[in-house]
Image (spheres, rainbow, N blue to C red):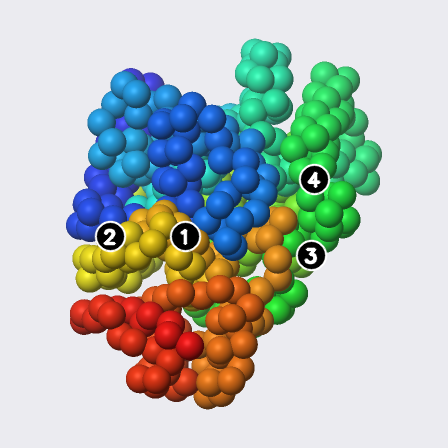
Amino acid sequence: MKKDYIILFAIFIVVFQFRLLFAFQTPYLSADDAYYNLRHTEHIMQTFSPIIFDQLSYGGRYIIDSHLFHYFLAFLKLILPMSFVFKMLPELLFASLVFIIYGIAKRITENSTAALFAAFISGFIPIFISNSLNNLSQYALLFPLLFYQLYCMLNLKTHMGRFILLAFILPLLHPFSFILSIAMVLYSILLNLEGMKVVKMQRESILFYILIGILINLILYKRAFFSSGLLAVWQSIPTNLLVQYFTNINVLALVYNIGFIPLILGILGILIGLFKEKQKPVYLLSAMILGNFILLFLKLISIQVGMMFLGILLALISALSIEKLISYLNMTKFVKYKQHLFFLGVILIVLTMVIPSYFNAKNIIDNSISFQEVEALNWIKDNTHENSTVLASIEEGNYITGIAKRKNVADKQFMLAPNRYSEMQEMFITESQVKALQFIDKYGVDFIYLSERTKKERSIEHLKYVDKKCFHMVFKNEKTTIYKVLC
């Protein structure tokens, strides 16, 4: 047992060091959304209160957020260095998932070797690396707590208090936590279809978790429901953007990014658990996968988040397949080659999981915001009026508010925000100066921030409507160009 914990801790160190190796290759955060969280955390640190009405986002709008994650970061910043809180802590939280996955896998299989393999696999899901590395995200806290709540669900007799506490924390942290409520309902249905009963303690816990989740979400998002009705469930994401969620999906790319090993072993584990052994924990995990697909089908979550969650679940369920393979191996003559086969398994994980994760991580860092972009944003902060409005692509809106400290026209926080998505897309590809100036006048744009990443994403070389009469180039470097609006 002590040896197993040493190996588990070694896996954690490897995963953590892997993430830090890339995260510290840049002094900046990789995702635009990270600067939303950074800005709100800094505001709480300075004023001890959250931003309720944001003067900068969309030129001014209400923010709906419990800010639990921002208060969590702000509190830690009081006692820990900034580089740890904003850089190392997210990587530490994401890496800590290996401990929770091990605990759940051990609970399901009662085989520490299978649980260790599942933990190792979970640390190197390529799509999980792509969407979590060097990112100050609420998912850094949500994912470990969500899976720990799952562990508590499987051990209610000893973890009831923690289950109740997390039932209050998770809905405050992020709406995605509601997936556990959906999974619990589906879990109950699946058991009833199989003629199995949900024990009283589980039944009461499920009902409690669902009711608390609904209550907290109704209170937290009441302004959004009054304003947008049922559209608030989709977080007011523009229809044009929702349509793009499942366009150009490449099946081979999904297999590559989830990982061949967790995909095959995970599906095999589901089949074994549901149809051969009929294990209740596997019914719960299967319900979570089904709930994840329902949210994806209804476009309530992005394909990236859905695949991240699916990858971890499949890695977890793969422990059941690995346990069966080990049991079969012990009954054959190949048992004397057991250590060699385990070593071969590790090599396969490295080749199909760790190496793809390496390339995904490298790609994320290579495409992070650059020094030249930050230089341009700081120029805006130092050389423009504090009430200036800056037009940037919607994917860079939080750079404008978070780094340049100026008003943007739009960003990716859509809740209670006016729908400007189509107009924003048009502004970077239109050839009509008349149309562009109408937009500029409508939203009071003073400056235009044009980055190389925007040019690449829109397949443009320059803004076709820009001329010397109405626009003056006030800043330019290798990565960015800034225009001042004259007309």
Residue 463 visible in the current orientation: no
Q: Quadrant of the N terminus?
A: top left
- Left or right: where 228 falls relative to 305: right
> The residue under label 1 is which amino acid type?
Asn
- Left or right: where 21 falls relative to 230: left
Q: CA distance from mark 2 to mark 1?
A: 12 Å
| Closer to the eye: label 3 or 4 | 4
> The residue under label 4 is which amino acid type?
Arg
Q: Which class describes the residues within 10 Å of circle 1: few (<14), some (14-19), or many (20+)? A: few
Q: CA distance from mark 1 to mark 3?
A: 39 Å
Earlier along the polypeptide chain: callout 2 or callout 1?
Answer: 2
Q: Return the residue nearer the eye: 204 or 194.
A: 204
Q: Return the residue nearer the eye: 341 or 192.
A: 192
- Left or right: where 2 falls relative to 486: left
Task: Please name the residue shown 33% across and 23% down the image.
Answer: 76
Q: Which residue is mark 1?
A: 387
Residue 347 screen position, x and y as percent: 26, 51
Earlier along the polypeptide chain: callout 3 or callout 2?
Answer: 3
Q: Return the residue nearer the eye: 120 or 393.
A: 393
Earlier along the polypeptide chain: callout 4 or callout 2?
Answer: 4
> The residue under label 2 is which amino acid type?
Asp
Residue 298's disc is: 3
Q: Are marks 3 and 2 in contact (CB under 8 Å)?
A: no
Secondary element type, mark 2: helix
Residue 186 screen position, x and y as percent: 73, 40
Earlier along the polypeptide chain: callout 1 or callout 4?
Answer: 4
Q: Which residue is mark 4?
A: 223
Earlier along the polypeptide chain: callout 1 or callout 3?
Answer: 3
| Closer to the eye: label 1 or 3 | 1
Secondary element type, mark 3: loop
Q: Which residue is mark 2?
A: 382
